[in-house]
Amino acid sequence: MSERDIDELLEALWDEEEREALAEAASPQAMPPLGNLGWRRALEGALTQGLVEEGGQPAFTSRGRDRARDIVRRHRLAERLLQDVLDLESVEVESTACHFEHLLSTEAANSVCILLGHPATCPHGKPIPPGECCRAGVSDIRPLVVPAHQLRVGESGRVAYLGTRDRRRLERLSHLGILPGTTLALLQRRPSLVIQVDETQWGLDEALMREIYVRRLRRRD
Amino acid sequence: MGQYGLITMGLTYALAIVLPILTFFFIAFGILEDSGYLPRLAIMANRAFRAIGLSGKAVLPMVLGLGCDTMATLTTRILETRRDRIIATLLLALGIPCSAQLGVILGMLAGVAPEAVVIFVAVIASQLFLVGFLAARIIPGETSDFVVEIPPIRLPQFSNVLLKTFYRVEWFLKEAVPLFMIGTVVLFVSDKVGLLVLLEDAARPVVVGWLGLPSQATASFILGFLRRDYGAAGFFRLGEAGLLDTTQILVSLTTLTLFVPCIANFFVIIKERGMRTALVMVAFIFPFAVLVGGLLNLVLRSLGVSL
């Protein structure tokens, strides 16, 4: 039994809670393959450390919840980093993130968060628990991935992900050809935002631009 | 026959007065359209329109409304949400003077001091913003996202413009002229039945007392509903005859511009937005126009403004 195993247990419990909250069916695959023995040992360790409470279904203590939140945050930020910046395939993302999360310290995770522009969801769509940096809206490291309206005039970016879940808006954006992978350049800011996607120019609202998260590319000449 | 005859008024009005003006408007609009200017106009207007709660795309019907409000109301179909369409329709009916009206308005403004023009424009513009702003708050629904494609600026193909103009004029003849005819019939019947006289008597105290206009103006207002610029022309004649001082000119022009839409426009609003919405709009616009006109009269008179 190691700290890692306890971390995995806490993460699995957090996942469980989220699924229940969304009224999704509990999936046995959610539990990483620790084996029943490893599982029980991890549970004992967690109990000993005062991270969970005994019960039919183990529940978090407040300390346990904090630690779980931290781990889940690191895991999901790692996934985002591996996918958006390092461009890994999703199979690799998952397997690497599993290890990565244990290597990131909380500060490193915050730096990653700032770099990615405080993303709200992981590539699977699950929410990333916010950290101090998000609350403060920190951006002293020049973020690599930003909402498109923060581009400077003349800059272009490659779309990393779309922040909206509104179906109408998603359809709208895909009609414009704005999907992860396409490049857009900001031509104009006033009086309205004007972007160029491939050969077409579009005038847009800021509201729509906020939902498009892009990775900055070299400045357009 | 007679003053309000189907031929003397209906056909001559629609064909001899409105059609030429409208045709030239369509040509000019077609040129603007094909050159790629209009989406750029929408981009420029977006911020201002956002303040009213509309999207920049609404500038298109508004500009068309300067040609013919009836057609512009049909054009509100390009707006995506029902809410946007209602607000645009309301503002069109309220404050956008159609080309026929504009002619008379400009003619009358030509004879007065520049400050009067400023006051007129300021009042109309401010009312449009005010009503738009309030409507955006009150009318439920979402506003659409502003997305316009910007084509490259290019020289319009003249044959294309002519073709479009042709289709639009054809539309006008097929759809709007019958409505004008119906309006004339209504006018004709009301005249014969004595309804017009009744309306005039009922309206006179408001026109004279609250708006401070001479009593002949009453007939022009009534006419103004059925025939927008026939009513306006009535004021023009009063002005020419020297029966209106500058304040009265301002008040009458303001009230006329804000006044209820012409009957053709009204029918189209019923068709596009439904009877209930149309009635609510008219029920609002009518007293509102009179109120603003009267207030203007009050303010100008009490401030002793003479231009």
Image: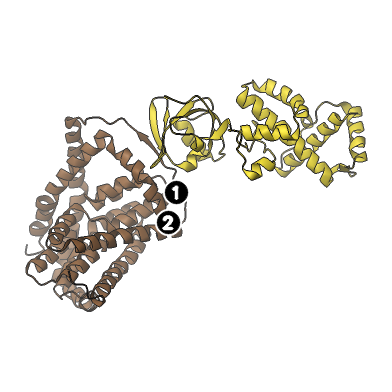
Seen in the picture, residue B257 relative to A48 is either above or below; the reply is below
Tag 1 residue: B143
Among the chains, which one is yellow?
A: A
Q: Is residue B194 left or right of residue B287?
A: left
Classify 10 Å Cα crowding around label 2: few (below 14), some (14-19), many (20 and above): many
Tag 2 residue: B136
Q: Based on the displayed image, in which of its 4 quarters is residue B161 positioned? A: top left
Seen in the picture, residue A203 relative to B49 is either above or below; the reply is above
* Mark 2 chain: B
Mark 1–mark 2 CB contact (< 8 Å): yes
* Mark 1 chain: B
Q: Based on the displayed image, in which of its 4 quarters is residue A191 positioned? A: top left
Seen in the picture, residue A29 relative to B148 is either above or below; the reply is above
Q: Is residue B170 visible?
A: no
Determine the CA span between mark 1 and mark 2.
9 Å
Instruction: Answer with mark 1 or mark 2, whichever residue precedes in sequence.
Output: 2
Secondary structure of the residue carrying numbered label 1: loop
Classify 10 Å Cα crowding around label 1: few (below 14), some (14-19), many (20 and above): some
Along the viewing direction, whichever of A221 and A122 lies nearer the viewer: A221
The structure residue drawn at horizontal position 61% and vertical position 37%, both measured from the top left corner, is A140
Q: Based on the displayed image, in which of its 4 quarters is residue B29 positioned? A: top left
Counting from the top left corner in percent of width and height, residue A217 is at 51, 25
Secondary structure of the residue carrying numbered label 2: helix
Residue type of the residue flagged with mark 2: Ala
Q: Is residue B34 visible?
A: yes
Chain B colour as displayed:
brown
Along the viewing direction, whichever of B118 and B194 lies nearer the viewer: B118
Quadrant of the rendering where the C terminus of chain B is positioned: bottom left
Quadrant of the rendering where the N terminus of chain B is positioned: bottom left
The structure residue drawn at horizontal position 33% and vertical position 51%, both measured from the top left corner, is B272
Residue type of the residue flagged with mark 1: Thr
